[in-house]
Amino acid sequence: KNQVEQSPQSLIILEGKNCTLQCNYTVSPFSNLRWYKQDTGRGPVSLTIMTFSENTKSNGRYTATLDADTKQSSLHITASQLSDSASYICVVNPADRGSTLGRLYFGRGTQLTVWP
Amino acid sequence: KAGVTQTPRYLIKTRGQQVTLSCSPISGHRSVSWYQQTPGQGLQFLFEYFSETQRNKGNFPGRFSGRQFSNSRSEMNVSTLELGDSALYLCASSWGRDSGRGPYEQYFGPGTRLTVT
């Protein structure tokens, strides 16, 4: 069973609308959680990184939240644009605090399509 | 500052052959990680190198190997290719390794698309 589950698998929204993508994880212990955006045919680009002690992080129109108690994270996109069409991937690093060992766990991604 | 570069961008090989992929990290970055991405499995961690040493390894068979040079450039090798090895292979670099002092931003290259026939 994948330790990082994302929902929905795919999403279609109209330009200008807001949307929220979900990420549930079971990875423990947990050091940090990342959200990446991947355009078709390109490598992922980092949007946000949150440590276990942070519960929100913004990057322009992207806002990520984290609830380490329930092991849930969400990525909220406001005022969507056509260029937001991409796969959004949630990644969890289970490295213990103080340990340099890490092994990233990836969700399967949410494919977002923004229509004009 | 130049980004992460990977060569070649596209590669077609036949079953049983071996392949070597190359990754040049961002100047000054010491950590290089490799990932495999397929439509069925998504992104999967292969291994991580830091200061020429493999620091972490994912759940892949021994046919997958890598190394890092003193200039931080890295190569990964896949021997005895199988059809299931067809994938996008991504390399990512960062200045340091995630630790209790905090996470480091990771930058991905464009990937090498490997097709095994």
Image: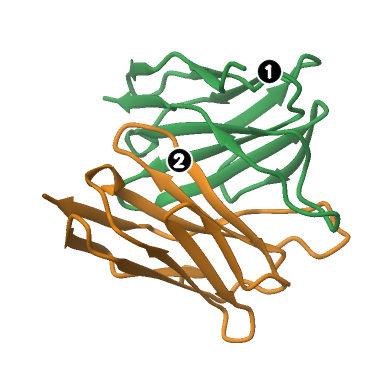
Chain colours: A orange, B green
Q: Residue at x 29, y 70 (%)?
A: A8
Same subunit, tags 1 and 2 = no
Residue B61: x percent and y percent? 56, 42
* Residue A107 picture quarter: bottom left
Q: Is residue B15 visible?
A: yes
For mark 2, does the 10 Å Cα neighbourhood hold few (<14), some (14 to 19), or many (20 or more) residues?
many
Label 1 crowd (10 A; few <14 / some 14-19 / many >=20): many
Q: Which residue is mark 1?
A: B73
Establish if B67 lies above or below A24: above
Going by the numbered disc 2, the residue's amino acid type is Pro
Say which element carries label 2. loop
Cα separation between marks 1 and 2: 20 Å
Which of B42 and B25 lies nearest the eye of the viewer? B25
- Residue A7: x, y in percent? 34, 71
Amino acid at the residue labelled 1: Arg
SS for callout 1: loop
Q: Quadrant of residue B74?
A: top right
Q: Where A60 falls versus B81 (above or below)?
A: below
Name the residue: 77% across, 14% down.
B71
Chain identifier of the residue bearing label 2 in the image: A
| Residue matched to label 2 | A44
Q: Pointer 1 indicates a residue of which chain?
A: B
